[in-house]
Amino acid sequence: MTRRWRPLVAYVAAVLDATLLGSIVQTQFNLAALSALGADIPFSTRLATTGHDLLGFTPLYGSLVAIMMLGAMPAATLVTRWLGFGAWPIHALAASLGLWVMLSIVDALAPMPTLIAATRSLEGTLAMMATAALGGWGYAILAYLDWDGASG
């Protein structure tokens, strides 16, 4: 693969990674909240709900993640080049903080208190940020990978 396509491939993979993992995490946090209220949620319902959210929630969430990654990944790349090292931790941190900023902006604009219910708690917010960090980490791996087999 030519060097010029690496950022695009890495970007698409990062968005997909963070979006799919984030959708699954938010579903499970929502189901956990229902369980805490006394609802009995069998495993089959958890799976079905997760599948439903992957189809219904993912497009909206994916658009937020895609916008966030458009800013966070180039910024992380600039910082990485400036420092001369640390691609994956910088990209993971940039994606994580970028999602936090994106959620803060969206929550300020949304008519409800929070757009994503899982982010009503610190644990849920940190879990969602962790999924974005995994996307940023994946971006760095793919963008900086020496496609001949060594990492660069």
Image: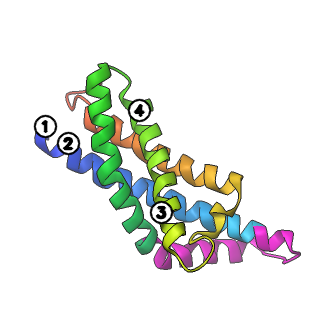
Question: How many numbered marks does the figure carry?
Answer: 4
Q: Are dots 2 and 3 in contact, CB under 8 Å?
A: no
Residue 71, percent from left and from top: 31, 50
Residue 22, percent from left and from top: 53, 59
Q: Are dots 1 and 3 in contact, CB under 8 Å?
A: no
Distance of label 1 from label 2 (alpha carbons) = 5 Å
Disc 4 element:
helix
Query: Of all residues shown, which one is farthest toward the right?
Result: 38
**Residue tagged by mark 2?**
6
Determine which of the numbered discs, if any, sits on residue 90 in the image.
4
Rendered-image quadrant of the N terminus: top left
Distance of label 4 from label 1 (alpha carbons) = 21 Å
Disc 3 element:
helix
Q: Are dots 4 and 1 in contact, CB under 8 Å?
A: no
User: Toward which corner of the image does residue 42 lie, by quadrant?
Assistant: bottom right
**Residue tagged by mark 3?**
105
Q: Which region of the structure is painted magenta?
A: 33-58
Q: Which of marks 4 and 1 is nearer the N terminus?
A: 1
Query: Of all residues shown, which one is farthest toward the top?
Result: 84
Magenta segment, principal secondary structure? helix
Residue 57 shows in the view? yes
Q: Does the magenta stretch include residue 47?
A: yes
**Residue tagged by mark 1?**
3
Amino acid type, callout 4? Ile
For the residue carrying disc 1, how many other residues have a C-alpha within 10 Å: few (<14), some (14-19), or many (20+)?
Answer: few
Judging depth in this view, the residue of 112 and 43 nearest the camera is 112
Disc 1 element:
helix
Residue 134, percent from left and from top: 48, 44
Residue 51, percent from left and from top: 55, 74
